[in-house]
Amino acid sequence: MSLLLSSGRSRRAALPVALCVGLAAVLTACGEDPDKGTNGLGKLSATEIERKAQSAAATATAVRLSGSLVTGGETYKLNMQLKKSGGIGTVTSKDSTFQLLRIEDELYLKADAGFWSHADGGAEGEEPTEDDVSAAEKLSDKYVKVPEGDSSYEQLSGFTDKRVLLDGILALHGKLTKGDRARIGGQRTIKVNGGEGDGGTLDVSLEGVPYPLQLVRAGGAGTVTLSDWGKDFVLEAPSKEETVDYGSRLPKTDDEQDQ
């Protein structure tokens, strides 16, 4: 009798346990939906995700771009704030770090004496003269206006041009495929791979506007992080006290001498 009672109780107890297990499985499955609470971008094709990311980037009023770019055999480290009317930030190339400021067509360059004395120093390996050093000290940490006709104007202004920079780095190469979900700066993203990753990998935000948040460029050509989308910043021309007029043409930097 006790055996029958025990067996009956076991069967009755097993029923709610089974229901709970089944319900837990359903709830777990629902919780694993990777698109829950997102902007739905993950449900689109890789091509559509790339197109939406590029469109969001093009229409954004401002962005901060930081990281490294490899172009023409040279590696540049950037930390630039960009918008339609110009940009401001720092660029590091080889052993030189300089600041760039562009407001519409007016471009300014600021660097230390080491940068200017090296630029004025003639051929590679040649020590700068006393006159070079003296001139460099006058330019040190001052804004120098880059003449539009100078050979360096186009190269340097490109670092401050939102459209030029983004058009140049956001394109992936090869067949596009969707990759894993990830997080960049605390935001959920979905990866789009070009050529299974060999053509670059773009992380696009799954939260809010589908902005591109990080790009690993093809061929080891650098990794760039994009942030502060739509966050405005002030562009203000330097005062006369902060500015030095170098003349009609700047000295060539090491990068230009190598080209």
Image: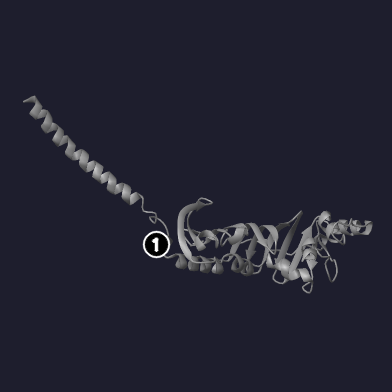
The residue under the point 39% across, 54% down is 34
Q: Quadrant of the N terminus?
A: top left
Q: Nearer the viewer, residue 169 or 40?
A: 169
What residue sits right under mark 1 in the picture? 43
Helix, strand or loop at mark 1: helix
Judge whether 249 appears above or below 77 on screen: below
- Residue farthest to the right, as pictured: 130
Q: Nearer the viewer, residue 241 or 73?
A: 73
Q: Quadrant of the C terminus?
A: bottom right
| Left/right of residue 28 with respect to residue 3 in the rendered view | right
**Residue 146 coordinates in the image, percent (x, y):** 78, 68
| Left/right of residue 146 with respect to residue 205 in the rendered view | right
| Left/right of residue 165 with respect to residue 245 in the rendered view | left
Judge whether 182 appears above or below 85 on screen: above
- Residue farthest to the top, as pictured: 2
Q: Is residue 126 visible?
A: yes
**Residue 8 coordinates in the image, percent (x, y):** 11, 33
Judge whether 30 appears above or below 44 on screen: above
**Residue 118 coordinates in the image, percent (x, y):** 84, 57
The residue under the point 52% across, 59% down is 197
The residue under the point 68% across, 67% down is 158
Q: Is residue 207 visible?
A: no
**Residue 126 coordinates in the image, percent (x, y):** 88, 57
Badge 1: residue crowd in 10 Å (few <14, some 14–19, many ≥20): few
Quarter where residue 134 is shown? bottom right
Q: Nearer the viewer, residue 190 or 80?
A: 190
Please, what is the three-letter code of the amino acid marked with disc 1?
Lys
The residue under the point 25% across, 42% down is 21
Q: Count every numbered label the image shows and give the total.
A: 1
- Residue farthest to the left, as pictured: 1
| Left/right of residue 49 with respect to residue 8 in the rendered view | right
Quarter where residue 108 is shown? bottom right
